[in-house]
Image (cartoon, rainbow, N blue to C red):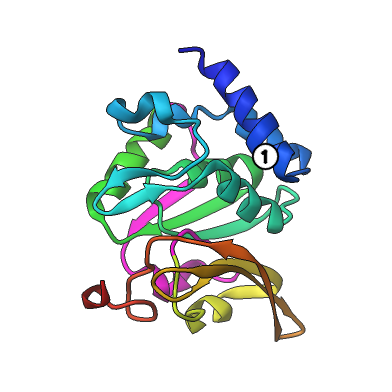
C-alpha cells in the first residue's frame, strides 16, 4: 500500500475538505506516518475517516478530530503543552512537531509503554510521558500554554484550569456517556471563557475528577 498517497488523500479530503486551514497542522499530518500508530491487522485502515481501536477499550481518534483539536489551540511553536490520554501516541506526536515541549499522561500502563517506544523509534525527543490520573493534570510542570484532553469528561476537571497559563487554552470533550461537545476553554485575566465547537463522541476520561471506572 502506498501510504504517502493515502496521507495525501486524508489531508485533502478529510482535513482541507472539512475546513482545516492551518498550514503547519496540514504539513504535519502530511508527513507523520499514522500507520505506525495502529495495530498491524488494522494498518490498511490507518488513514480511514474513523477512529480505530488500539486495545484496552481505547481508540486512535478520527484524523479530522485530531486536526480540529490541534488547530483550535493555535500553536506558534514555543508552547509547553499537557496532553491527557497518550493512547497510541499519534496526537502526542502531532503536538510534538508543533510545539516546544509536550507532557503526556496515560492511565493504562501498557499503552504508555507502547507509545514511548514509538516516540523513541521515530526520534521524537520533546515528549515526556507519565502514567497516572490525567484528570489531576501534572502540577509539577505547570503552568501550561495549552492542555488537550483526548477523552471525554462530564465537566471540566478544575485542576486543569488551575494549571493553565493566563491566555492559555484547554480543549476537551464535555458531555454524557453517549455524546459530547468539543469545548474550548480560554483563560484571560484569570477568567475562564467557554466555547462549544461541535458534537463528538470520545472514550471516557476516567479518574478522580472525571468519570469513575464503575460508571462504564
Count of marks overlaid on the render: 1
x then y, percent, for residue 16 = 73, 37
x then y, percent, for residue 163 = 55, 75
Residue underneath mark 1: 15
User: For the point 28% across and 27% down, which residue is it?
Assistant: 41
Magenta stretch containing residue 141, yes or no? Answer: yes
Q: Say which element carries label 1.
A: helix
**Residue 213 appears left or right of 29:** left
Q: Would residue 147 be seen by someone viewing this image from the given angle?
A: no
Quarter of the view holding residue 167: bottom right
Quarter of the view holding residue 74: bottom right
Q: Which residues are magenta?
A: 122-151
Name the image quarter holding the C terminus: bottom left
Residue 107 sits above or below residue 174 on the image: above
x then y, percent, for residue 5 = 59, 17
User: For the point 46% across and 73% down, which residue is it?
Assistant: 139
Foreground: 4 or 216? 216
User: For the point 38% across and 77% down, which residue is it?
Assistant: 210
User: For the point 61% across and 73% down, which residue is it?
Assistant: 164
Q: Residue furthest bottom?
A: 191
Name the image quarter holding the N terminus: top left
Foreground: 9 or 155? 9
Residue 196 sits above or below residue 47 on the image: below
Magenta stretch containing residue 63, yes or no? Answer: no
Amino acid at each position: 500500500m502506498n501510504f504517502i498517497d493515502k496521507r495525501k488523500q486524508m489531508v485533502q479530503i478529510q482535513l482541507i475538505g472539512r475546513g482545516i486551514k492551518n498550514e503547519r497542522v496540514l504539513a504535519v499530518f502530511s508527513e507523520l506516518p499514522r500507520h505506525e500508530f495502529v495495530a498491524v491487522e488494522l494498518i490498511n485502515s490507518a488513514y480511514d475517516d474513523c477512529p480505530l481501536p488500539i486495545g484496552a477499550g481505547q481508540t486512535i481518534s478520527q484524523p479530522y478530530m485530531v486536526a480540529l483539536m490541534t488547530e483550535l489551540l493555535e500553536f506558534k511553536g514555543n508552547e509547553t503543552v499537557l496532553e491527557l490520554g497518550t493512547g497510541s501516541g499519534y496526537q502526542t506526536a502531532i503536538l510534538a512537531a508543533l510545539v516546544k515541549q509536550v507532557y503526556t499522561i496515560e492511565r493504562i500502563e501498557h499503552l504508555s509503554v507502547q507509545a514511548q517506544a514509538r516516540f523513541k523509534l521515530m526520534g521524537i525527543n520533546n515528549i515526556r510521558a507519565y502514567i497516572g490520573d490525567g484528570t489531576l493534570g501534572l502540577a509539577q510542570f505547570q503552568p501550561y500554554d495549552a492542555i488537550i484532553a483526548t477523552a471525554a469528561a462530564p465537566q471540566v476537571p478544575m485542576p486543569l484550569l488551575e494549571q493553565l497559563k493566563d491566555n492559555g487554552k484547554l480543549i476537551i470533550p464535555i458531555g454524557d456517556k453517549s455524546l459530547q461537545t468539543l469545548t474550548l476553554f480560554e483563560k484571560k485575566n484569570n477568567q475562564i471563557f467557554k466555547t462549544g465547537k461541535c458534537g463528538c463522541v470520545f472514550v471516557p476520561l476516567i479518574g478522580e475528577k472525571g468519570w469513575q471506572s464503575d460508571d462504564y
